[in-house]
Image (cartoon, helix red, strand yellow):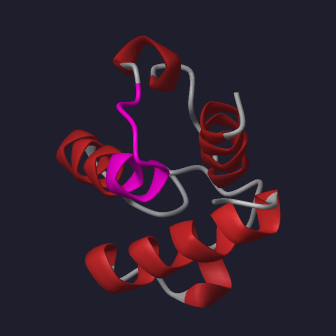
Amino acid sequence: MITSKADVLQTLAGYLRDSFEVPDSKIRLEASLFEDLDLDSIDAVDLVVQLQEYAGRKIPVAEFKTVRTVGDVVDQVYALVNA
């Protein structure tokens, strides 16, 4: 069970670092997934798959269309798991 947004951020940072080779120095809540972290649409799909496994439930695509920053991802995953 996820207990805090900090837990979500820590897990997300691990995915970004391990799967997409994003340096820790770039992983900030205000960092744009596409401009700052250089993810593309395929990377975004891969990230959603990893987050679904972490959250233990399906993430509705419509909810993730508005996600632009690391902080947005943290907020969405946290809300989904604690709904």
Residue 71 sits above or below residue 13 on the image: above
Image quadrant assignment for residue 9: bottom right
Look at 60% across and 50% down and name the residue there: 32
Image quadrant assignment for residue 77: top right
Residue 3 sits above or below residue 46 on the image: below
Residue 25 sits above or below residue 35 on the image: below
Look at 32% across and 57% down and name the residue there: 50
Is 56 placed left or right of 42 in the picture? Answer: right
Q: As drawn, which residue projects farthest toward the left?
A: 42
Pick whichever, 11 or 25, lies toward us: 11
Pick whichever, 17 or 11, lies toward us: 11
Residue 34 in the image: state x and y as whole percent. Answer: 45, 48
Residue 8 in the image: state x and y as whole percent. Answer: 65, 62
Look at 54% across and 66% down and name the residue there: 12
Q: Which residues are magenta?
A: 51-59
Q: Is residue 35 magenta?
A: no
